Image (tube, rainbow, N blue to C red):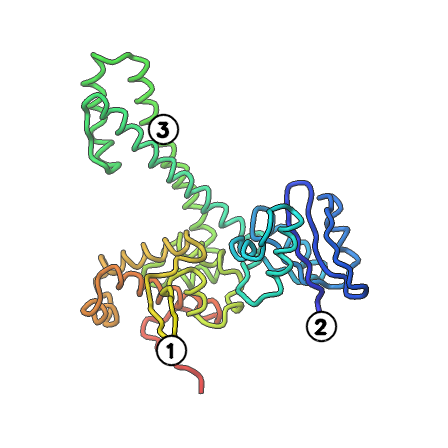
Amino acid sequence: MSYTAVGVDIAKNVFQVHYVNTETGEIVNKPIKRAAFLEYFANREPCLIGMEACGGAQHWARMLTTMGHQVKLIPAEFAKAFNIRNKNDAADARAIWLAVQQPGKAVAVKTETQQAVLALHRMRQQLVKFRTMQINCLRGLLTEYGEVMAKSRAALDKAIPAVLARVADRLPAVLIDTLREQWSGLTKLDGQIAEIERRLRQWMQQDKAVKAVAAVPGVGVLTATAAVATIGDAKSFRSGREFAAWIGLVPKQVGSGGKVTLLGISKRGDTYLRTLLIHGARSVVAHAKEPGPWIEQISKRRPPNVVIVALANKMARTIWAILAHDRSYQKGHVSVKAA
């Protein structure tokens, strides 16, 4: 079936639509109000609709898919490459229309449950970031008064009562009270982060795919839930290597004149999931009692960081195989390519 390609630049109130009428050849590039957007596509023949993977795109992709349209969410940097003139809504819609007709891996359209899990991860990530900022702020402010503390949270909790007692005689009480309140607020942040992690563990116990992925060494509740929610449909990837490349765990290539040079990892795709996989691999290399012969052999030939990234790549491929083939993790499993 031939789908009419449509480029849509979504916004808060006014959406821009660009396509070519197959019957008349007319180029249509028009704005549509948010309230009339779904009505515009309700009675049309199935289209291939391209949208940037930005805020609100997942919602509109789900709604349009239920109408029978095929939706392709395009990374913003890929769509930007087709905008060769001034940036405005009409030009962006045309660039998306060009991009949606090109081959390339689209961003997965997620279910509301998967998006809800990722929302928990984003809120936890923000809380952790704010907690780190709060700790550094306390250390920095007290350094101005000659009190230097170590970097870790444990060192801060151990030293700050004595530090506040020493400076209480020479600093205003309003500052001491505020510093003490900010330090006490860290406990509240700890509780909020722990509650989000408890809810993620609860979802892991209810989801078969997450429980299967969590059995992989180096994969905990955060990595398992983030991987299942991010990947969407695992069968949309042809292989585990394609999934690993999608999250930026394969070497970047630079070539000219038939000579190809491999550089560091590409760092494309989802930064959060890639970070979790690398941290999990680092934990396995550093703390596993039996890391396995594969890690031991590669550790003899490569630097530690290269070993960690290679293991993260292997973990990503294992996660894809578990989800794509609907099977449990087997420690001694050897993958055999079909004849």
Element assignment for label 1: loop
1 or 2: mark nearer the eye: 2
Residue 185, disc: 3
Q: Earlier in the sequence, mark 1 or mark 2?
A: 2
Q: Quadrant of the N terminus?
A: bottom right
Q: Which of the 4 image quarters holds residue 153? A: top left
Q: Which residue matches tag 2?
A: 1
Residue 172 percent across, percent down from the top left: 28, 12
Element assignment for label 3: helix
Q: How far is disc 1 from disc 2 in space, using C-alphas?
A: 36 Å
Q: How far is disc 2 from disc 3 in space, using C-alphas?
A: 59 Å
Q: Amino acid at mark 2?
A: Met
Residues packed near mark 1 inside 10 Å, few (<14), some (14 to 19) or many (20 plus): few
Q: Viewer-proximal residue, 184 or 93?
A: 93
User: Which residue is drawn at the image coordinates 37% and 40% (left, top)?
Assistant: 128
Q: Is residue 132 above or below residue 242?
A: above
Q: How far is disc 1 from disc 3 in space, using C-alphas?
A: 50 Å
